[in-house]
Image (cartoon, rainbow, N blue to C red):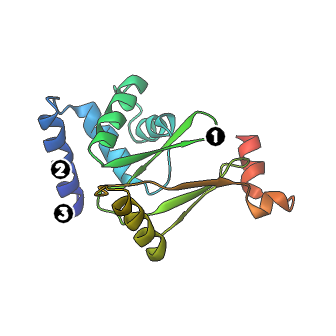
Amino acid sequence: MDKRSRNETEAVKAHFRRAGLRWTGPRQEIVDAAFSTHEHFTAEDLLHMIRERNPDTGVHLATVYRTLQVLEEGDFVEGLDVDKGSRLFEHTFGHEHHDHVICEDCGRICEFHDETMEARKEAAARDLGFAMRRHSLRIFGTCVELAAGHCSHYKARRRG
């Protein structure tokens, strides 16, 4: 484990202790898997990743959901509500902030960062009497590829 991974894990452990929760082997496996990917994932995807690494794992889906909730509360992961009730997560701790554009039809997610937009969001909060601590911007639409009739993401999703 590299220094950054150790530091992230120590920060997560401290967060769990502050929340009055024990640090367990299953929670370690969940954090290791979540922090090892830079892709968006569901709780089910995360459990699959864990089981691929360790077929004999004792991690259960309910533990994954509970752990993701605690990780989200500590700003280690961010949850994205997409696709009529689906929830995706991504490892955000130690990563630059970004926003998302999501195709409601094929599920494709594009990440972007725009300094001008960031400044405008900060100014909007300030103008309304808020000191912004964090924010999330999600733009929903239809991707150009799907509108043109040749979206590989849509085809892959239909097969999946």
Q: CA distance from mark 3 to mark 1?
A: 36 Å
Identify the mark at residue 153; answer none if there is no mark. none
Query: In the rendered image, which quarter contains the C terminus?
Result: top right
How many angstroms separate mark 1 from mark 2 (CA)? Answer: 32 Å
Task: Give the residue at mark 3.
Answer: 3
- Mark 3 residue type: Lys
The N terminus sits in image quarter: bottom left
103 lies left or right of 109: right
Q: Where's residue 149, x and y in %?
A: 87, 58
State the residue in front, 24 or 65.
Answer: 65
The reply to whether residue 56 is visible in this rendering is: no
Nearest to the eye among marks 1 and 2: give it. Answer: 1
Q: Is residue 143 left or right of residue 81?
A: right
The disc label shown at residue 11, or none = 2
Q: Residue at x 38, y 31 (%)?
A: 64
> Which amino acid, mark 1?
Asp
The percent position of residue 38, horizontal first and vertical second, equals 44, 57
Looking at the rendered structure, the secondary structure element under dot 3 is helix
* Rendered location of residue 144, percent (x, y): 77, 63
